[in-house]
């Protein structure tokens, strides 16, 4: 179940189990849109240790043809975050253009955390182009999957990712903005 924070469309959260709090969540995704930079800040937190995790942006609720950001944190603390394009039901290749920036990842209290920024609209035809009227279904790989620490290859997710029941719009929260509609879809 997804939730707009404080009744806005620029801040949101999805967590599993739905009523979990803090370190009690198996998976948690938050997002915040910044108008001035046209950036969305995403933070993904999961209890899955030594597994990859991430988030996907889909036009149709199906895994193929989905823009996804995947990441992992090694035992050493070194991390990898990657912009990928899911062409089908097999290991995703890196997207030719890596459209995430200001990336960080860490482990804390047994939780793996990924944080990254992404523009709402990029010049990459394989990226989901967020807009006030172009809202994705979000995919949440709650259980993530195993990765090979030597070659950084990831294996299939261990459980079918949960897909949001409705499209999730990430919009401006500026009051009286003529170019942004802040109503829910």
Image (spheres, grey):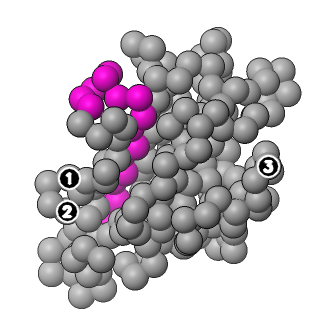
The range drawn in magenta is 20-35
Above or below, 76 against 158 in this view is above
Q: Label 3 near label 1: C-beta < 8 Å?
A: no
Instruction: Provide residue 95's location: percent of width, then percent of height.
Output: 75, 57
3 vs 2, front mark: 3
Q: Label 2 near label 1: C-beta < 8 Å?
A: yes
Residue drawn 75% across and 53% down? 89
Horizontal side, residue 152 vs residue 22: left or right: right
Residue drawn 35% across and 41% down? 15
Question: Which disc, if any, is residue 8?
Answer: 2
| Image quarter of residue 34 | bottom left
Q: Does the magenta stretch include residue 150?
A: no
Which quadrant of the rendered structure holds the C terminus?
bottom left
Q: What kind of element bears circle 2? A: loop
Horizontal side, residue 144 vs residue 5: left or right: right
Q: What kind of element bears circle 1? A: helix
Instruction: Provide residue 37's location: percent of width, then percent of height.
Output: 41, 63
| Image quarter of residue 109 | top left
The CA distance from mark 3 to mark 2 is 36 Å
Above or below, 104 against 110 in this view is below
Instruction: Provide residue 47's location: percent of width, then percent of height.
Output: 46, 23
Number of residues whose C-alpha sits closer than 10 Å to that of mark 3, classed few (under 14), some (14–19) or many (20 or more):
few
The CA distance from mark 1 to mark 2 is 6 Å
The reply to whether residue 155 is in sight is yes
Which badge, 1 or 3, comes first in the chain's sequence?
1
Residue drawn 40% across and 82% down? 133
Q: Name the residue under label 3.
A: 90
Q: Mark 1 points at which residue?
A: 5
Q: Is residue 32 magenta?
A: yes
């Amino acid at each position: 179940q997804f939730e707009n924070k404080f009744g806005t469309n620029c801040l949101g959260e999805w967590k599993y189990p739905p009523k979990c709090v803090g370190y009690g969540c198996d998976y948690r995704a938050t997002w915040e849109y910044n108008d001035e930079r046209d950036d969305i800040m995403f933070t993904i937190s999961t209890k899955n240790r030594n597994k990859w995790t991430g988030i996907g942006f889909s036009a149709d609720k199906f895994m193929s043809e989905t823009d996804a950001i995947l990441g992992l944190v090694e035992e050493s603390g070194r991390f990898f975050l990657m912009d990928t394009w899911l062409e089908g039901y097999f290991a995703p290749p890196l997207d030719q253009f890596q459209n995430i920036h200001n990336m960080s990842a860490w482990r804390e209290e047994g939780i793996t955390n990924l944080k990254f920024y992404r523009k709402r609209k990029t010049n990459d035809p394989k990226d989901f182009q967020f807009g006030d009227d172009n809202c994705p279904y979000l995919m949440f790989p709650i259980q993530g999957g195993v990765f090979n620490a030597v070659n950084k290859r990831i294996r299939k997710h261990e459980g079918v990712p949960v897909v949001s029941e409705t499209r999730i719009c990430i919009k401006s929260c500026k009051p009286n903005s003529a170019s942004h509609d802040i109503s829910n879809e």
